[in-house]
Image: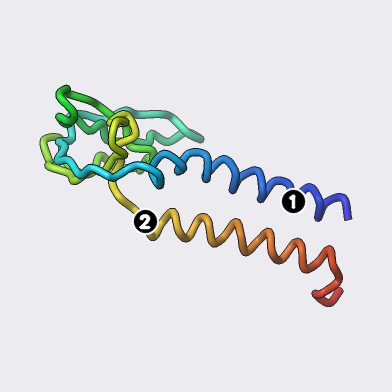
Amino acid sequence: MVFLIAGQALCLFCLWVLARRDFVRLTRPALRVEGVVAGYRSIWDEGACSYAPVYRFTSEGGEHEVIEAIYGPVKKPAVGTGVSLCHPAGRPDLAQVPRPLLWLAVYALLAGLDAVLLAKMLGWLPE
């Protein structure tokens, strides 16, 4: 029972962190901008190098740079490639490549796991 409660608490905490991150994106109008891949940030993880593109764009009267949150094993797309970005009005620092289905899937996975844990705690699932 302790593991079920801990798992449910972890799921709810993850949902809260994601919702807190997306609150600004959901409550402000979204602005689309065209960015350019200006370079790459690299990290070493478990003996392999991973890369995240750095996007440069102009919005709200200034030039901005943001680093992609998702790292990959190859430098893709090439430097100088144009990319469509989206950010909430007034927050160009939160610009990202729009991936609504990915984030919807993450929310659904966490909510579904939480529902399964709750059903198990309430005895609705067989042993």
Q: Give the image location of residue 18, x and y in percent.
A: 52, 44
SS state under label 2: helix
Q: Quadrant of the N terminus?
A: bottom right
| Looking at the image, residue 33 lies above or below residue 4 | above
Q: Amino acid at mark 1?
A: Gly
Closer-to-camera residue (79/107): 107
Crowding around mark 1 (Cα neighbors within 10 Å: few <14, some 14 to 19, many 20+) is: some
Q: Which mark is residue 63?
A: none
Closer-to-camera residue (100/69): 100
Residue corresponding to mark 1? 7
Residue corresponding to mark 2? 100
Q: Give the image location of residue 93, x and y in percent.
A: 32, 29
Image quadrant where residue 63 sits = top left
| Looking at the image, residue 94 lies above or below residue 64 | below
Q: Amino acid at mark 2?
A: Pro
Image quadrant where residue 48 sits = top left
Please identify, in this view, whether the residue under mark 2 or under mark 1 is nearer the observer: 2
Residue drawn at the location 12% of the way across and 42% of the way down: 82
Q: Quadrant of the C terminus?
A: bottom right
Residue drawn at the location 81% of the way across and 55% of the way down: 4
Q: Is residue 48 left or right of residue 20?
A: left
Residue drawn at the location 45% of the way across and 43% of the way down: 22
**Mark 2 and mark 1: Cα distance apart in space:** 26 Å
Residue drawn at the location 38% of the way across and 38% of the way down: 69
